[in-house]
Image (cartoon, rainbow, N blue to C red):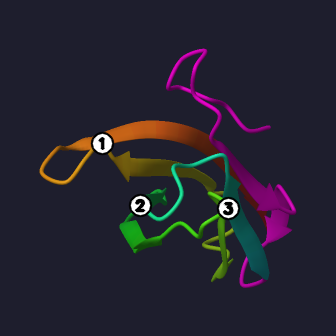
Amino acid sequence: MPRKPGGPKNTAILTLTPSTISSGETYSISGEGFTPGRFIALGILEPDVAWYWNGYVDNAGKFSFEWVASDPGAMVVHNAYQKKGTNAGYDLLATAILMVTA
């Protein structure tokens, strides 16, 4: 289930489809409610490695792409960060968890 760590004003939602998947299968990562046109960084935290996907949110505040599930039994945490401004840092706006089965 998506969470919104940015507080009550945060409208960003990160969704993984499906939320439980077998190792080696492809799943969809999508986001909505982000600031349109801004840079986004997505951290995909697996038990042994961290991956990062970087891109821009579209004019509707959305993004989506596909990823391949990790090792069986893993709980993979996905964190979506977006730049605060031109020279500012990033805010954590949404988190979602994927369970990988055998």
Q: Earlier in the sequence, mark 1 or mark 3?
A: 3
Q: Residue at x 57, y 49 (%)?
A: 34
Describe residue 68's horizontal placement relative to residue 92 as left or right.
Answer: right
- Gap between marks 2 and 3 measured at Cα: 11 Å
Q: Are marks 2 and 3 in contact (CB under 8 Å)?
A: no
Disc 2 residue type? Arg
* Residue 55 picture quarter: bottom left
The secondary structure making up most of the magenta span is: loop
Above or below: residue 18 compared with residue 9:
below
Most foreground residue, 9 or 96: 9
Q: Secondary structure at mark 1?
A: loop
Most foreground residue, 26 or 86: 86
Q: Badge 1 is on which residue?
A: 84
Magenta-drawn segment: 1-25
Disc 1 residue type? Lys
Q: Position of residue 100 (x, y in %)?
A: 74, 62
Q: Position of residue 11 (x, y in %)?
A: 65, 34
Describe residue 89's horizontal placement relative to residue 43 as left or right.
Answer: left
Q: Secondary structure at mark 2?
A: loop
Q: Badge 2 is on which residue?
A: 38
Q: Earlier in the sequence, mark 2 or mark 3?
A: 2
The numbered mark at residue 60 is 3
Q: Are marks 1 and 3 in contact (CB under 8 Å)?
A: no
Q: Position of residue 18 (x, y in %)?
A: 87, 63
* Residue 96 picture quarter: top right
Q: Residue at x 45, y 60 (%)?
A: 42
Q: Residue furthest top?
A: 8
Residue 73 appears in the picture as rendered: no
- Gap between marks 1 and 3 measured at Cα: 18 Å
Q: Earlier in the sequence, mark 2 or mark 1?
A: 2
